[in-house]
């Protein structure tokens, strides 16, 4: 199988970006857009298409993926794959013969690989703070936990390994029917991390800060930069922060293009994706544990 025919389910904001990015991916022969808003359904997928990309609202991801997998399609699903881990486990039976990939896009971002290479230089990692805040599209059918923070959980799992949820809070600043601010804490052994997300925030912040015993790393996704600081303690006094490196990321090939290229290659060669269903399940279990904490403090 050299050339792939793809269906993109959903033609909204993100679906349109996916279609545009697919045009630069080799081995893609045909892109069929299924416009849900105009009444099209998965029943309208052409018979020569056997791989699908699901870019519908997140509450439709699981049901759409299940139907397509039942019909034998390979599937890429925007994050989250489902709204809970139990639903994802229902899909595992299809993975022996079909490709199932979740859109944890930051695992395809060159920043993450660069950060992993630089971690030894800041000594022992002590704490990570991940922020995803914006004055953005206001949701009424989901919360920032599922809409925004799967990204941050996938990054922390990649950097730290297994995580334990130790605390969580949520706020409803506008008295809407769903919370608009979520913050939670996780840890791996002695390394702690705080994750915060909101779409009701006066600044656009997409930042990962890693504090080590001999320095710090700051990835600012809004500026497309990574800064590495030397902040050692000498004779019990803090030295001045000395910015030793500012690295501007090369995004001539975008993370979305990298991710989609990987999906097409997995469909073509039948290799398992980096962000396969097991990766989706690990993220979902953390999100479920956070939600359980939030339910306890209501």
Image (cartoon, grey):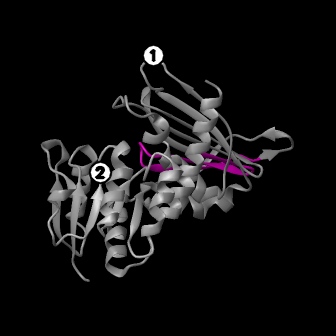
Would you say 230 lies left or right of 140 here? Answer: right
Which residue sits furthest top?
A: 175
Q: Residues within 10 Å of mark 1 (few under 14, many from 20)?
A: few
Question: Magenta region: which residues?
Answer: 209-232
Give whichever of 92, 101 is nearer the camera.
Answer: 92
| Residue denoted by label 2 | 55
Residue 237: x %, y % from top left: 82, 38
Total marks shown come to 2
Q: Quadrant of the N terminus?
A: bottom left
Residue at x 41% of width, y 63% of height: 101
Residue at x 68% of width, y 49% of height: 215
Residue 181: x %, y % from top left: 50, 28
Residue 202: x %, y % from top left: 43, 24
Q: Residues within 10 Å of mark 2 (few under 14, many from 20)?
A: many
The residue tagged with tag 2: helix, strand or loop? loop
| Residue denoted by label 1 | 175
Question: Residue 115 lies in what quarter of the image?
Answer: bottom right
In the figure, 275 relative to 156: above or below? below
Give whichever of 62, 267 is nearer the camera.
Answer: 62
Would you say 224 lies left or right of 238 here? Answer: left
Residue 275 can be seen in this image: no
Give whichever of 259, 217 is nearer the camera.
Answer: 259
| Mark earlier in primary sequence (2, 1) | 2
């Amino acid at each position: 199988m050299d050339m792939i025919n793809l269906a993109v389910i959903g033609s909204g904001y993100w679906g349109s970006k996916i279609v545009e990015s697919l045009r630069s991916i080799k081995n893609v022969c045909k892109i069929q857009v299924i416009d849900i808003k105009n009444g099209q359904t998965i029943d309208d997928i052409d018979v020569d298409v056997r791989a699908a990309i699901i870019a519908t609202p997140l509450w439709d991801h699981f049901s759409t993926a299940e139907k397509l997998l039942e019909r034998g399609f390979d599937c890429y699903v925007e994050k989250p794959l489902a709204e809970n881990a139990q639903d994802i486990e229902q899909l595992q039976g299809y993975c022996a013969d079909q490709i199932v990939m979740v859109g944890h896009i930051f695992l395809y971002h060159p920043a993450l690989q660069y950060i992993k290479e630089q971690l030894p230089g800041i000594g022992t990692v002590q704490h990570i703070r991940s922020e995803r805040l914006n004055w953005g599209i206001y949701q009424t059918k989901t919360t920032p936990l599922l809409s925004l923070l799967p990204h941050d959980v996938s990054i922390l799992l990649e950097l730290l390994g297994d995580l334990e949820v130790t605390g969580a809070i949520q706020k409803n600043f506008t008295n809407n029917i769903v919370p608009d601010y979520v913050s939670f804490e996780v840890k791996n052994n002695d390394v702690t991390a705080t994750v915060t997300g909101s779409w009701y925030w006066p600044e656009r912040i997409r930042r990962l800060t890693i504090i080590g015993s001999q320095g710090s790393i700051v990835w600012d996704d809004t500026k497309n930069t990574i800064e590495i600081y030397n902040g050692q303690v000498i004779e019990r006094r803090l030295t001045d922060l000395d910015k030793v490196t500012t690295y501007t990321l090369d995004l001539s090939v975008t993370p979305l293009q990298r991710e989609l290229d990987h999906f097409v290659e997995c469909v073509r060669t039948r290799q398992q994706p980096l962000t396969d269903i097991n990766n989706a399940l690990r993220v979902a279990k953390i999100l479920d544990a956070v939600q359980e904490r939030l339910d306890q403090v209501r």
